[in-house]
Image (spheres, rainbow, N blue to C red):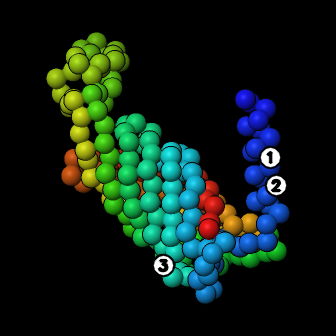
Amino acid sequence: MKRITMVLAAFFGVWLVSTAAEAAPSPGRKISSGKGGNFGIGLSLGDPMGLSIKGFLAPNHALQGDLGWAPLHHGDGRLGFDYLWHPGVFASGPVAEFMPYLGLGIGMMFWSDRCYYRYYYDDDGDRRYRGSRHYNGRCSDGGVAMFIRAPVLGLGVHWKKAPIDTMFEGSWSPYIIYPDLAHGDFSFKIRYYF
């Protein structure tokens, strides 16, 4: 099974590199449709870790969505949507274009059957584990918290020879309904466009 997975991954990688299609439109270009079009789906690694989608509404404007695990937000699940603005191409070469972007976002964190903070310090100053059933502070059987992302700052790499892009992204992302301001997120994203 492992050998089959490796062969399929190698085949898919060669196919992506050899295709002549371009990825989503670079800022200032006309939006195209079909292969290498305006909608991308892929993975996000970091916070969030999971599924990532992006759709260009115009050459400089896009919507992004993420669903996954958020390790920098107490290990919660996360669903979020962002509006992204790409001001232009920062640098361009024969293989790739580098595009900074700026945005705003909103979303929800969700969890079940656990404490919000896992540790506490006892009277002697020793760090102790706070189990979800034994702590009478900020524990619950589950919950939802709303968060914002402001600003979303990123650098996108638009690959010219393949319908993929990669992004390095970060933002301040505090909870606003269940107030907790000390949160940020950072992620690496890769998406295939069709």
Pick the front one: 185 or 193: 193
Disc sitting over residue 10 in the figure: 1
Disc sitting over residue 14 in the figure: 2
Pick the front one: 42 or 136: 42
Quarter of the image with the C terminus is bottom right
Q: Is residue 18 visible?
A: yes
Q: CA distance from mark 2 to mark 3?
A: 30 Å
Q: CA distance from mark 1 to mark 3?
A: 33 Å
**Which mark sits nearer the N-terminus, 1 or 3?**
1
Rendering coords of residue 176 (x, y %)? 24, 54
Q: How many marks?
A: 3
- Taking the spot 22% from the left edge, 16% from the top edge, the residue there is 134
Disc 2 residue crowd, few under 14, some 14–19, many 20+, Cα 10 Å:
few
Is 19 situated left or right of 55 in this image?
right
Is 184 situated left or right of 167 in this image?
left
Q: Which residue is mark 3?
A: 57
Quarter of the image with the N terminus is top right
- Taking the spot 26% from the left edge, 16% from the top edge, the residue there is 122
Rendering coords of residue 147 (x, y %)? 31, 54
Q: Is residue 157 visible?
A: no
**Which mark sits nearer the N-terminus, 2 or 3?**
2
- Taking the spot 50% from the left edge, 70% from the top edge, the residue there is 55
Observer-side mark, 2 or 3, equals 2
Residue at the top extreme, as displayed = 124
Secondary structure found at label 1? helix
Rendering coords of residue 3 (x, y %)? 79, 32
Disc 3 residue crowd, few under 14, some 14–19, many 20+, Cα 10 Å:
few
Rendering coords of residue 77 (x, y %)? 38, 42
Observer-side mark, 1 or 3, equals 1
Location of residue 136 by image quarter = top left
Pointers 1 and 2 in contact (CB under 8 A)? yes
